[in-house]
Each structure stands twice: as C-alpha cells, then as structure tokens.
Image: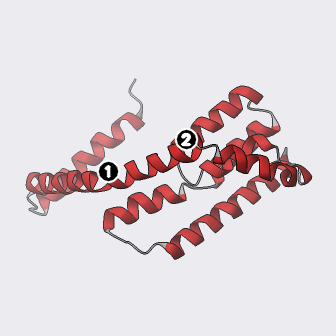
Amino acid sequence: MIAFSTLIIPLLIGGILLFATWKRVPTYEMFVEGGKEGIQMAFSIIPFLVGMMVAISIFRASGAMDAITQLLQPVLALVGVPAEVVPLALIRPISGTAALGMTSDLIAQFGPDSFIGRLASTMQGSTDTTFYVLTVYFGAVGIKKMGDAMKVGLLADLVGLIAAIVVVSIVF
C-alpha cells in the first residue's frame, strides 16, 4: 500500500501543470527560465559560502574557540551551564552543519537523556545560523549593508540560547 504522503509531490506538480495549462501559461518555457535563474543564483553565492567556510576553519584551527571556552567557563559554571556546550553556542550562528555535528558528538558522548544532550538539542532548535543566513540570502540579492540585521540576528540567537538554558533547567 502506498502512503498518501508519497503521492503529495507528484499530485502537486500535476496540479500546477494542469492549472498552468488551463491558464494558457507556457509552462515548459517558464520552467526553463526559472532553472536558468536558479543556476545563476547558485553560482553567485559560491564566493560567499567559500569565504564563510574559510572563516570557520580559521576560527576553529586557530584555537580561538578553545580560548573563548576557557575564558567563559568560570562564569558559566556559576549559572550551571556546562562548558561542553560553549563551542556549540559559538558555532551555531555561523554554521548549521558544524553545529549539528557538534550536537551529534555531545549526544554520542553524554547521551540523549543527559542534561548536556538535552541542552544541546534544545540549543540546536532554538537558535539560527545567523551568519549563514546573512551570507547566503543577503549575498544572493546583493545587500551589502547588513549591520542591523546581524545585530538583531545575534540578539535573537542570544535570547534563544538563554531560553534554551532556562527551559532545559526547569523542565529536565
């Protein structure tokens, strides 16, 4: 038996094609034009992605992340935040993939039901990849001045991080 969810996308595509035909839209030509624009956009954001990946590699390889973790450890210990999640908090606004890898490592090391595992999972879901979003989306549309958006994005990440700590501390 085929689940209905496996039919949703083919039905959606078929419905769009039927609607476009009914409205006399040149469907194939529009599809090809959209494909061309998508490829051009993908090539235009490659320099931004390469720059961001190089910056992340330099940040991690330089030892700056370890130094910041060591610097913050005494303060975070006072409020009950384990030092193991500090690298996740630092890398999450930069790269979602790197943060997901760190979350997976923390869960594998401490277990999914541990405080660190729950905190890492909640932090992963309550913050965003602010620098990635700014780099890719703002770069794709050519926005150069992104200072205010970066401030608001990082503030939202900080609020999400604090909320994750508070909620996990209260609930678990």
Question: Where 70 sits versus 129, above or below?
Answer: above
Q: Which badge, 2 or 1, comes first in the chain's sequence? A: 1
Q: Nearer the viewer, residue 12 or 70?
A: 70
Q: Nearer the viewer, residue 60 or 123?
A: 60
The residue under the point 74% across, 53% down is 164
Q: Judging from the image, what secondary structure is the residue with disc 1 in?
A: helix
* Left or right of residue 109: residue 38: left
The residue under the point 82% across, 48% down is 73
Question: Where 39 sits versus 111, above or below?
Answer: below
Question: Looking at the picture, which amino acid does disc 1 mark?
Answer: Ile
* Cα gap from disc 2 to disc 1, whole angstroms: 18 Å
The residue under the point 37% across, 34% down is 6
The label shown at residue 98 is: 2
Report the number of discs: 2
Tell which residue pokes out farthest to the top in this image: 1
Q: Position of residue 2 (x, y in %)?
A: 38, 27
Location of residue 126 (image quadrant): bottom right
* Left or right of residue 134: residue 115: right
Question: Looking at the picture, which amino acid does disc 2 mark?
Answer: Ala
The label shown at residue 46 is: 1
Q: Which quadrant of the rendered structure holds the N terminus?
A: top left
Q: Position of residue 155 (x, y in %)?
A: 65, 68
Q: Which quadrant of the rendered structure holds the C terminus?
A: top right
Question: Where 100 sits versus 39, above or below?
Answer: above
Q: Position of residue 76 (x, y in %)?
A: 84, 52
Around disc 1, counting alpha carbons within 10 Å, would you say few (fewer than 14), some (14 to 19), or many (20 or more)? some
Q: Nearer the viewer, residue 130 or 31?
A: 130
Around disc 2, counting alpha carbons within 10 Å, would you say few (fewer than 14), some (14 to 19), or many (20 or more)? some
Location of residue 75 (image quadrant): bottom right
